[in-house]
């Protein structure tokens, strides 16, 4: 009687083991699929909505604190080289903000809470004529602008050149 019981438990354990492996493979496969599909498709609608909502919020702050609304194109792109979150470009009077799609999946909260207001502050500084400042554009005025736009983290990013006055680095 005893050996049979042990055998039964052994079988049960074996099944449990197999299902754990199966579940793990499924999760692995699903994660792989998720990151594959994220890389190869447009960003999900939920991401687009979060970005658009945040932009609205920034623009409301702008209206309240500066008395006008200046909307810039927010472009999500995977053409960034390196791990920059965002970038503001000023070229021939045209101001654009680029957001790095490559870091979005892992850093979406940071993108929303910090990066969008940060870059929008650069864009607004350009608009207001602060074009040739020191500090890579991260001056005291920029910082105040960032705070006025509702930015949570208005510190300059260390070692991150993300003000581009000429050609885009990825074009
Ligand atoms: Zn910056």
Image (cartoon, helix red, strand yellow):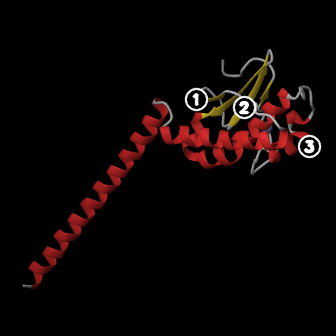
Whether the residues at callouts 2 and 1 have beta carbons within 8 Å, the answer is no
Q: CA distance from mark 2 to mark 1?
A: 12 Å
The label on residue 18 is none
Q: Residue at x 12, y 80 (%)?
A: 5
Residue matched to label 2: 87
Q: Residue at x 82, y 46 (%)?
A: 148
Residue density around tag 2, few if under 14, some if 14–19, many if 20 or more, within 10 Å: many
Whether the residues at callouts 3 and 2 have beta carbons within 8 Å, the answer is no
Q: Residue at x 43, y 35 (%)?
A: 37
Residue matched to label 1: 78
98 with respect to 39 (left or right)? right
From the image, state whether disc 3 or disc 1 is nearer to you: 3
In the rendered view, would you say 26 is above or below 1? above
Q: CA distance from mark 3 to mark 2?
A: 19 Å
**Residue 123 visible in the shown view:** yes
Residue density around tag 1, few if under 14, some if 14–19, many if 20 or more, within 10 Å: some
Mark positioned earlier in the residue sequence (3 or 1): 1
Q: Quadrant of residue 81?
A: top right
Residue 86, horizontal then vertical, whole percent: 69, 35
69 with respect to 81 (left or right)? right
Residue matched to label 3: 140
Which of these two is toward me, 67 or 134? Answer: 67
Which of these two is toward me, 146 or 88? Answer: 146
Tell which residue pokes out farthest to the top in this image.
92
In the rendered view, would you say 168 is above or below 161? above
Which of these two is toward me, 105 or 52? Answer: 52
Residue 144, horizontal then vertical, whole percent: 87, 45
Q: Secondary structure at mark 2?
A: strand
Residue 117, horizontal then vertical, whole percent: 73, 42
Mark positioned earlier in the residue sequence (2 or 1): 1
Residue 73, horizontal then vertical, whole percent: 67, 27
Q: Secondary structure at mark 3?
A: helix
């Amino acid at each position: 009687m005893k050996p049979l019981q042990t055998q039964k438990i052994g079988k049960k354990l074996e099944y449990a083991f197999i299902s754990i492996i199966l579940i793990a493979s499924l999760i692995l496969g699903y994660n792989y699929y998720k990151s594959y599909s994220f890389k190869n498709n447009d960003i999900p609608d939920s991401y687009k909505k979060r970005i658009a909502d945040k932009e609205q919020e920034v623009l409301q702050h702008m209206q309240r604190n500066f008395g006008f609304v200046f909307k810039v194109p927010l472009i999500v792109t995977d053409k960034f080289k390196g791990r920059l979150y965002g970038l503001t470009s000023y070229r021939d009077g045209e101001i654009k903000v680029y957001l790095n799609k490559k870091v979005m999946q892992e850093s979406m909260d940071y993108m929303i809470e910090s990066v969008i207001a940060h870059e929008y502050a650069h864009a607004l500084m350009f608009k207001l004529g602060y074009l040739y400042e020191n500090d890579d554009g991260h001056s005291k005025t920029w910082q105040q602008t960032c705070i006025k736009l509702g930015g949570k983290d208005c510190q300059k990013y260390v070692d991150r050149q993300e003000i581009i006055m000429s050609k885009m680095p990825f074009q």
